[in-house]
Image: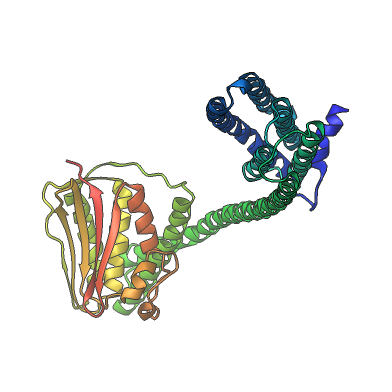
Amino acid sequence: MARHLLSWAPGMNFTVRPQGFEAESGAQIARRVPQALAAFVAVMGAAWFFEHRGHPGRDLAFAVLYFAESASLALAALLLRFERFRPYAAGITSVAACLVAVFMGAYHVWTDGEADTLALGLSFLAVACSAFLPWGVRGQLPLAATTLGVYVGAIALRPSITADVSAEISFLGLGCIGALSVGAAYLFDRYRLDLFRRTRELEEANRALREANEAKNRLLAAVSHELRTPLSAILGYADLLLDGTIEEVGEGTRMAVDRIARNARQLLGVITDLVDLSRAEGGQLEISTDTVPLDVVFEDMRGLAEPLFRERPIRFECPDPGPLTVRADPQRLRQVLTNLLTNASKYTAEGEVLLEAVPQPNGTVAVRVRDTGTGIPPEDLPLIFRPFRRSKIHEQISGAGLGLALARELVERMGGRIEVESTLGKGTTFTVHLPSGG
């Protein structure tokens, strides 16, 4: 019988509730009941002090009331510590609140208290429960009905109860407040229900996105493997032809083979960037930081820059960084600088490209790649580090829009940051800030 009564309130649904909503409501109520108990003990303890000053003869009655009400709430809090009672959280706490209302009525009957004070106290109880406990109409309606019943019962049992405001007006006010508290509880419950559904929809969408991302990663891994194998063969045979290992080739053939090799390497670079970016975004890209001497890295960059700027009116400057070192992954740092220098070569028709390293007062080293190319419009600067996003003025130049996105991911995973400054028509400077290795 008791189990049936406790299950009545949670089962009183005005809308179809999705699976899991009742469990979440029970968990929220269970978390808030101890807070409600603490607030009740504090408020009623303060009220006891003022009641004693005005009516010292009511101390015994107030003590009985105080401990009985506190015990009711404490029992509800204790029951809800057990998982098996969580489905009945609304019913348990509603019963506890109704008991508090009954004890309040008993106190006023015992002490010949004021009818308007009782109505005010019952109103506060109803409003507080409506605002504090997310139990909806199923918990608030019994409490509102109980408060009205307690008030009528107290007047009937002790007609001598005095009132500065007529009992009829107090009853009407209590009824209005009770009705409003039920309406507020209903609206709050509907809001929580809508929020719960939206949250579940978002969780489902996120799950679908994660599955799609995993499928994309598997596809990229398969495609990269299938593409890298023939590209490696193309590059291998192209190098053999260029070296004259297979046979001597004429100048025209050499130029054609060299163009084949350059485009194959560019395609291989796009595939590598795409796979690395996908791994970095998924947290699967391994980064191993160490102390890296920049003079060795810059020497490698000079070797890379030679074919990039060969036979073009571009002067490449790369001053010796001296003994400067940084904390980074050597392979990934070379990959970042390669992407930045490749971009500089694409967007600089003539002029200068500079690679330099400058120690900073805050214990970092700024590695800069500066060019005198086309520059980037100010409105496009926030977008260039996003995958597949490129400045509109560069759309006619080949590129997948992956290099800068990957560079930022790699730099940040190495504990640094990357910045960009650009003036349209005058050039762009990318600055990679990394912790100093010294």
Residue 410 or residue 419, whichever sits in front: 419
Q: Is residue 209 left or right of residue 359?
A: right
Q: Splitting the image into 4 quarters, where does residue 355 fall?
A: bottom left
Residue 250 or residue 150, whichever sits in front: 150
From what the image shows, is residue 47 above or below residue 192? above
Q: Is residue 145 visible?
A: yes
The quadrant of the image that shows the C terminus is: top left
Q: Is residue 254 visible?
A: no
* Farthest top residue in view: 60
Residue 171 or residue 236, whichever sits in front: 171
The quadrant of the image that shows the N terminus is: top right
Residue 211 or residue 36, whichever sits in front: 36
Residue 316 image point, x, y percent: 17, 68
Which residue is at 70% across, 42% downward? 135
Which residue is at 72% across, 51% downward? 176
Residue 122 image point, x, y percent: 68, 39
Q: Is residue 70 left or right of residue 246?
A: right
Residue 79 image point, x, y percent: 70, 25
Q: Splitting the image into 4 quarters, where does residue 400 fall?
A: bottom left
Residue 344 image point, x, y percent: 27, 70
From what the image shows, is residue 75 above or below residue 316? above
Which residue is at 67% across, 36% downward? 114
Which residue is at 74% across, 34% downward? 98
